[in-house]
Structure formats: structure tokens, C-alpha cells
Amino acid sequence: MATSTLAEQAKQNGGGDAEAVRGPERRGRGGLLGSVFERTAGSLGGAIAGRLRADLDDRDPDYIRENLPLVWLLSSLWFRGEVRNLGNIPDDGPVLMVGNHSGGNVTPDTHVLTLAFSTYFGVERPFFQLAHNLVVASPIGQILRKYGTVSASHENAEKALSSGAALLVYPGGDWEVHRASWQSRKVDFAGRKGFVRLALNNDVPIVPVVAVGGQETALFLGRGNRLATALGLDRLFRLKVLPISIAPPWGLNVGDFLGHLPLPAKITIEVLPAIHLREQFGPDPDVDEVYAHVTRSMQDALDALAAERRFPVIG
């Protein structure tokens, strides 16, 4: 991608000069606080812009292998992770894994699934996960990139699949991961169907992955989407939410930007059978029909997993 294109994307996603994005007629408004906010947005936007394009070589199998014991301690002892039917993932070749997402910015379901995938298939099999630009550009982004985390974009997704890798995407993104705890038993992709087009364009199977328990690692009170809109976070950072939760060590946690100490809720994940779109839906699948089928099958599986749970956190 040309440098000019990156600059344009940076402005679209909150990067570049925040003052220029807002326009001269908006400058000077909001006083000192507004100026600081805009300068911070510009700095963060610049960091985000630098992470838009993925370098798949950042993934480090040796690093993953060396740190698997630590991930095992977190996933197996703290979250008592259980992953079922990994054999439904094709043994080789590109595959699009589509998951529901829970647990706020800590995303415990991703840790558990990464451990299971790496143990089952070996760390040498390429495995990448899409994440929000802010996550990849954060202080822990360098570590996440070693595990295969890349900025969420169609370009990066295409690049990963064309390399023959397994790719994990969460269509619900920040909208789903910050839903209220009492909505934890709902698959909510907010109507985002890009994953279907991605699978069709690359002629790869979709493997649905369903997880339960992540939304019990804190008390999530709401997405705060109206507050995010009022503050312009969507325009500046592509953030449609400013979630509010109660979680240690902060107590009242607004934004979850620094993460939180997750409660030791049991995480259970089930991998559903692979869906070969053109075999199942014909040579020219209808995107809406595929989307409805995937989300319905995932919701049915989530309902079954949720029915097994006796108590919150305990499982």
C-alpha cells in the first residue's frame, strides 16, 4: 500500500493530524481540555496508522513455544479452559474461524483458544487473530503480534488467508465484547457481514467458534455507545463504545483502556463443523443467507453451552 493511502486511512481511522481532520472552524473549541484531547488523539492516531498493515513475520513460533507454559497457567488454572471439537478445524490450508467475543479488552476466550490451537496443531502452523488497531498499537501490542495478532482490516485478513494461514475474526468486535453481562448468552455481530464476503472472495471454509464464560469475568454494565458518539471516539479511534464495568482493581471501570483483573470464570469453547460455502449454498451464495445460517448455528450452540452452566463464574 502506498504511503499516501496509509495517510488517508489514518485520517479515516483517527490518525494523522487531529486538528486537520476536525477542520479549521473547529480549532480552539473546548479550551485547554479540548486541545489536550485532540493532541492525544493525533499521537495515538499516528501510532495506529503505523500498525494498519500487518507484517506476518512478526508472529514468532519460538516465542509462542517458550511461553506456552505461562499461557497454560492462565488458561487452564485461572479460567479452567475447556475447548471442544478442535478436530472440526481442517488439518491444513487457509480457514476463516469466526467467533463470538466476550470479556472486555482482556478477551479471555482468545487466550484459551490460542493455547488450544497451538497445542493441537503445533506452533508452526500459521495462526493469526484480527484485533482493533488500538489493541495492536498498545503497550502490549508487541507481545500480541508475536502470537499472530494483526490490525483488523480487509487487507490484513486477505494477506493472512492468502498465505495459507488459519485466521480468527470476531465480527462483533468492540460492540459484542463489551455487551452487558446479562446479555452474555447472545451472539451479537451487529449485522456485520464482511466475514462472509471474506470467505467467499478467498474460497475458504468458515469454522464457527462459540465461547461462554467471558462475560462473567467482570460485571459489564453497558457499552456506553452514546457517550462514545458524544465524545467523537468513533471518528477519532473507530471506537463505537465507551464501556462501563465493575472490575478489580479499579472498581468502577470506564473504557477498560488499561484492562482489568478478570474474575476466574470458567471458559468453555466449542468449535462447530466447517462450512464450505459453495458446497452448501451453491456457486453464488447469498451473503444474507450465509450470515443468518452462521449466526443461527452459533446461537444454538451458545444456548446449549449456557444451559450447562449452573452458576456464574463457577460454571
Image: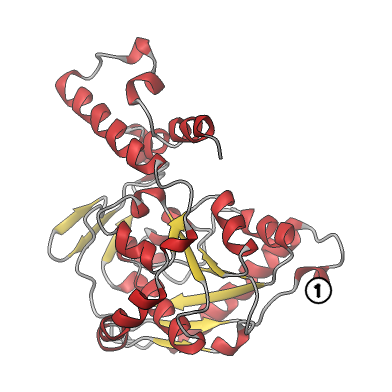
Q: Is residue 8 above or below residue 97?
A: above
Q: Is residue 93 left or right of residue 270?
A: right
Q: Is residue 100 above or below residue 311?
A: above
Q: Hey, what amino acid is under mark 1?
A: Gln
User: Residue at (34%, 26%) from the top-left corner?
Assistant: 18
Q: Is residue 38 left or right of residue 208?
A: left
Residue 292, position in %: x, y?
68, 64
Residue 166, position in %: x, y?
57, 71
Q: Is residue 92 left or right of residue 258?
A: right
- Label 1: state its secondary structure: helix
The image quarter in which residue 123 lies:
bottom left
Residue 96, position in %: x, y?
61, 68
* Residue 176 showing in the rendered view: no
| Quadrant in which the C terminus is drawn | bottom left
Q: How is the image coloured?
A: secondary structure
User: Residue at (36%, 54%) from the top-left corner?
Assistant: 136
| Quadrant in which the N terminus is drawn | top right
Q: Nearer the viewer, residue 80 or 146?
A: 146
User: Residue at (51%, 76%) from the top-left corner?
Assistant: 210
Count up the numbered dots.
Answer: 1
Q: Is residue 12 above or below residue 282?
A: above
The image quarter in which residue 213 lies:
bottom left
Residue 49, position in %: x, y?
41, 40
Q: Which residue is mark 1?
A: 280
Q: Residues within 10 Å of mark 1 (few under 14, many from 20)?
A: few
Q: Is residue 14 left or right of residue 153?
A: left
Q: Nearer the viewer, residue 314 or 38?
A: 38
User: Residue at (38%, 44%) from the top-left corner?
Assistant: 225
